[in-house]
Amino acid sequence: MGSLETVSLRLQSALSLTQDFVDLTQSFLYAMWNGLLLLTALAASTSVLPGQNGIPMVAGQYLLGLGVGDVTGPIVETNLMGYASLEQNGRGLHMRQRSRAYIVADGSAPNNRIVFINAGLYNDQNIAFVGTHSHAGVGGYLENLLPQITSLGYVKQTADAIVDGTVLAVQRAHASIAPGRLSVGSTNIVDGNINRSPIAYLANPAEERARYQYDTDKELTLLRFDDDNGNARGFLSFFPVHGTSLYINNTLVSTDNKGMAAFLYENSVEPDSMPGNATFVAGFAQANVGDTTPNTLGAFCHSPGKAWHGQPCDPLRATCGDTVTDCQGRGPGFQISDFESNRIIGELQFRGAQRIMESQGRVPVHGAVRSAHAYMAMDKHRFTLPNGTTVSTCSAALGFSFAGGTTDGPGAFDFTQGTNSSQPRNVFWDIVKGAVTPTPSAEQIRCHHPKPILLNSGAAHVPYDWTANTVSVQILRAGNFVMLIMPGELSTMAGRRIREALRNTLISSGILGSDANVVVAGPANTYAHYVTTREEYQIQRYEGASTVFGPFTLEAYIDKYSSMVPFLADNASGTPPSDAAPPEQTSKAISLQTGVVFDAAPIGKKFGDVLQNVNSTPYRAGDKVAAQFVGANPRNNLRLEGTFLTVDRLVAGQWRTVRSDSHPSTIFEWVRTNTVLGFSTVTISWTIETGTPAGTYRLSYFGNSKPLIGSISSFSGVSGSFTIV
Ligand SMILES: *[C@@H]1O[C@H](CO)[C@@H](O)[C@H](O)[C@H]1NC(C)=O
Ligand SMILES: *[C@@H]1O[C@H](CO)[C@@H](O)[C@H](O)[C@H]1NC(C)=O
Ligand SMILES: *[C@@H]1O[C@H](CO)[C@@H](O)[C@H](O)[C@H]1NC(C)=O
Ligand SMILES: *[C@@H]1O[C@H](CO)[C@@H](O)[C@H](O)[C@H]1NC(C)=O
Ligand SMILES: *[C@@H]1O[C@H](CO)[C@@H](O)[C@H](O)[C@H]1NC(C)=O
């Protein structure tokens, strides 16, 4: 049975809602199955909200629902998604990944609704072969082959966790639907990002650049969700910054800076709730993220002993003495660690969102809820430019600079960025790419010019499709707030162009007035790599090399999205013309990851026994307290919606949980110490936050072990108690 059918069956039993809602959610998941980050869809049926049609609604009211679900896949022995580094396999947990679902229904026509899912699969998504989108999330869930290479193929346990957690988030959002209001505001976060390919940005026309103060967008736009009494229930925000605060050498599963921002916000509203269990939902989505980096101090050479050690990298090719591997962007906390940089970039977004939430300057959102979706075959899509010339996109291909990586995560094979065909090539790649992707035709080479083709991926279908040639295009409208749901990562200027073009079209067609607010969200629905402007494409930095459908990719999207605008009108009916849906891939998926063989405890010990205890001397804020236990493989049970550890505090003779494995102050690490005998250890640590009350505490471990014969069973262990003074 194909995975889609499995998902469908699971949804039907899980949701026990109307068939329409099942279809709706299934369409999200279909999209997700195609490798999505932001998952969206619309239901337009009459029975979706039984019992809620009778609620008397007044003008400006919407029906709103918000929910969160845990989507953390296997945290050990699985490749992390984004940097495409074979060595970057999980060995523990920093923070859990979550999906956050938002439902907006028209108060006067509740069957018109949109669902926006901001999934904690950061940045990741774009998982590229030797790419640079880092992330610290669990990999293997994307459907196409190229992003699966480092995770040894498709990892069903990861995909299942994403589907189950996302269904749960949508169910929770659906169950919470109640009348309320929306308002929108924005603020600038000047220190939250910089451009990692400023030389490409400079290729844009001077008069266009003169309209903007910065070479990245600094604006965070926020859609606030209120209940009927004006109390905030949560928000959805949009700000462009890559999830590459945590470096390529990080091996703890985490959420990077967006998930940190969500944690900081939700925890500030409900400090006593465990992460993921707050009722307030804080969503931090990506905008035109393509050329942004959170490593705001710039890129420097880490080449001890070399003359250029500590110097900025070469600005065009991101090299240090002709190699990319030593060039690394530095975040604001670099003197401490990448985790500190991650916290700072997360906190900047949290504070920005808080300014808007507390501001009187937000304006109410008003108007109908609509959406439009289509599939678009980007393989040789012909269309007419505004100047009347007919042009075409190309079948997907990645250029040489793609393999160079970026200053957020250098490529492993020593390609450099800004590479034109005249420059020397990596011989290994010339051999490998011939073996793995078909040689491009003369027409394909011409179509992508000046991009020298490294991987002719759109033509590679063996054993299954390497990259998508058909993408999902979608627009969601919540009144005068319009979200362009994009299947790739748009560069700063590409995002500005499409937002401006669509806003103008929405206004000139009479659908929205001058208070129209248009944001870009992506990568969503399909992972279709990058989208730069045609001018940036000429420079062939990483982002240009990863603009897979050729120089006219952005113009093609602007043309298609503009053509969908009439379907957003209040009285619109029908759906936009669509190409065929992309072929399903998952049933053909190869998975080389092996399962857990077995776990055992050394003679005289049992699972959960303490091997190294906490100190008996008192701890203070800032100290790290740790204990080591006889462990078992955490892949035996992902403990979704639960935790592998707790920090407990003794209050009036009772142990009360005060931290979980998703607090950034706790770390869970697992080590297989003897493969033959099945032994392993777990180390739990907690860095005590300033303000932690004095008292008696302990660390607890929750695990599941797999015997050689028989079924998996649960166990727990506790450290000795310790005091904080
Ligand atoms: C990761 O690399 C950075 C420098 O690039 C270094 O400062 C840091 O200590 C490394 N982290 C680990 C966990 O090795
Ligand atoms: C989550 O919150 C609910 C109440 O809102 C509570 O009953 C439940 O125990 C909490 N779960 C955890 C894991 O803290
Ligand atoms: C229209 O614009 C394209 C892209 O800049 C250019 O190649 C073409 O020559 C232009 N056509 C006309 C008629 O100006
Ligand atoms: C690559 O070629 C384009 C046009 O062919 C040129 O404008 C650009 O400067 C070249 N880049 C490099 C790094 O040589
Ligand atoms: C929708 O309404 C506009 C004016 O409000 C009208 O011009 C247009 O013809 C209507 N379209 C449909 C499909 O009814």
Image (cartoon, grey):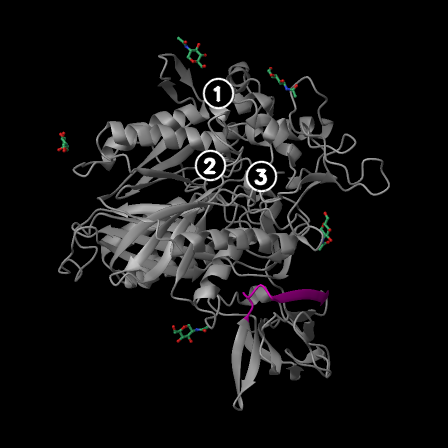
- Pair 3/1: label in front: 1
Sort mark 1 into few (<14), some (14-19) or many (20+) by Cα contacts within 10 Å: few
286 with respect to 170 (left or right) = right
Gap in Å between the C-alphas at discs 1 and 2?
A: 26 Å
Q: How many marks?
A: 3
Which three-letter amino acid code belongs to the residue tagged 2? Gly
326 with respect to 57 (left or right) = right
Q: Do the residues labelled 2 and 3 touch (CB within 8 Å)?
A: no
Q: Name the residue under label 1.
A: 207
Residue 683 appears at what percent x and percent y? 67, 70
Q: In this view, does 345 lie above or below 292?
A: below
Sort mark 3 into few (<14), some (14-19) or many (20+) by Cα contacts within 10 Å: many
Q: Name the residue under label 3.
A: 194
Nearer the observer, 494 or 415? 494
> Which element carries disc 1, helix, strand or loop?
helix
Q: Which residue is drawn at 48% across and 57% down?
A: 262
Q: In which quarter of the image is residue 75?
A: bottom right
- Ligand 2 - quadrant of the structure image: bottom left
**Magenta stretch holds residue 666:** yes
Gap in Å between the C-alphas at discs 3 and 1?
A: 21 Å
Which stretch appears magenta? 660-674
Q: Are marks 3 and 1 in contact (CB under 8 Å)?
A: no
Which three-letter amino acid code belongs to the residue tagged 3? Ile
Q: Which tag, 3 or 1, sits closer to the chain's start?
A: 3
Residue 111 appears at what percent x and percent y? 20, 50
Q: Which mark is residue 488?
A: 2
Which three-letter amino acid code belongs to the residue tagged 1? Glu
Nearer the observer, 462 or 497? 497
Would you say the magenta stretch is mainly helix, strand or loop?
A: strand
Q: Residue at x 26, y 31 (%)?
A: 507
